[in-house]
Image: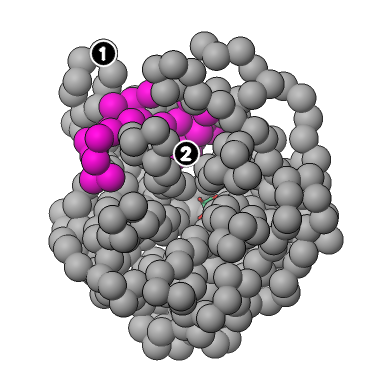
Amino acid sequence: MADKKPIVTHVFTADPSAHVFNNRLYIYPSHDRETDIQDNDNGDQYDMNDYHVFSMDSVGGEVTDHGVVLSQADIPWVSKQLWAPDAASKNGKYYLYFPARDKDGIFRIGVAEGDKPEGPFKPEPDYIQGTYSIDPATFVDDDGQAYLYFGGLWGGQLQCWASGSFNKSHLGANEPSEGHALGAKVALLNDDMKTLKSDVKDVVILCDKTGEPISASDHERRFFEAAWLHKYNGKYYFSYSTGDTHYLAYGISDSPLGPFTYGGRILEPVLGWTTHHSIAEFKGKWYLFYHDTSLSGRNHLRCVKIREIGYDEQGKIHLMEEQPK
Ligand code: FUB
């Protein structure tokens, strides 16, 4: 696979969420920083404390760093670890969604509002009630309804919520080994974009051969973290990281709520433990935004890259530099 260059090299960036606002491409990534915390399966080494926003007129063109748009010090409910964010726009306002640990060490999803896509963003005083775990991703459908997806296993604590309330005995690199895989979560957002309009539901991914939900032991295909939802040709694509097997995979559905039928892999393992992405159309082409550790050689100091993707006649995704499988 051809090597791609990082689009930003003066700071470390990861978990890129890409959106096109006003015909300009904006990227909302995590801002990785140096730490002396040793790598562990809980992800403690990902100890980020602010967000930057980046934008560009064209893929491959000059990238503008809009600087710090939200800091941990300004968010009353947060204790640490500003992880992978996403953004959305509605009614002329812009919203930054972010996961972080609350004062009890439990991951929750917060939201901050801004007047411009590049921020700055003013956080709500508390997290979005009803949310938990990590990696928020928003999707606004053609009818204006917004959805919030979230969840991540192990350090992301999703497994602690399997019974519906927080169970701290499941903290750490810990997940069910039998039965159906734990799903990401999805809820409808109210028009204010700051509160949930519905119950939190499971995102179910079905095996393309059996039609049964993917099993918990199927680590090559089960959801781990990094949810993303995009729409292509009238179909809804839910894509995600498989975590400890390091793939980016996806499923396809007729509804943003699923169930999604497993569709294949978008990206093979990259340099570094984590893999996390987004997919967006810009100026008539579709792109995969992802990260690896090629700039630093260290798991927690990542860099964002971009590749063009395409779809075959069945709607299956492939990298443009690779033949459709
Ligand atoms: O950046 C911190 C965490 O690493 C993210 O929330 C995960 O998706 C993984 O990329």
Amino acid type assigned to the residue bearing label 2 in the image:
Ser
Is 63 on the left-hand or right-hand side of 275?
Answer: right
Residue ID at (40%, 70%): 90
Looking at the image, residue 288 lies above or below residue 38: above
Amino acid type assigned to the residue bearing label 1 in the image:
Lys
For residue 250: magenta? Answer: yes
- Disc 2 crowd rating (10 Å Cα; few below 14, some 14-19, many 20+) is many
Q: Position of residue 245 (x, y in %)?
A: 49, 30
The mark found on residue 75 in the picture is none
Q: Secondary structure at mark 1?
A: loop
Q: Secondary structure at mark 2?
A: strand
Residue beneath disc 1: 209
Residue ID at (35%, 31%): 251
Looking at the image, residue 274 lies above or below residue 265: below
The response on whether ligand 1 sits within 8 Å of label 1 is no
Tell me the CA gap for discs 2 and 1: 21 Å
Bounds of the magenta segment: 239-266
Between marks 2 and 1 in the image, the one whose residue lies nearer the viewer:
1
Looking at the image, residue 286 lies above or below residue 44: above
For residue 74: magenta? Answer: no
Looking at the image, residue 167 lies above or below residue 103: above
Residue beneath disc 2: 241
Asked whether the viewer can see residue 308, the reply is yes
Q: Position of residue 19 (x, y in %)?
A: 55, 55
The image quarter containing residue 174 is top left
The response on whether ligand 1 sits within 8 Å of label 2 is yes
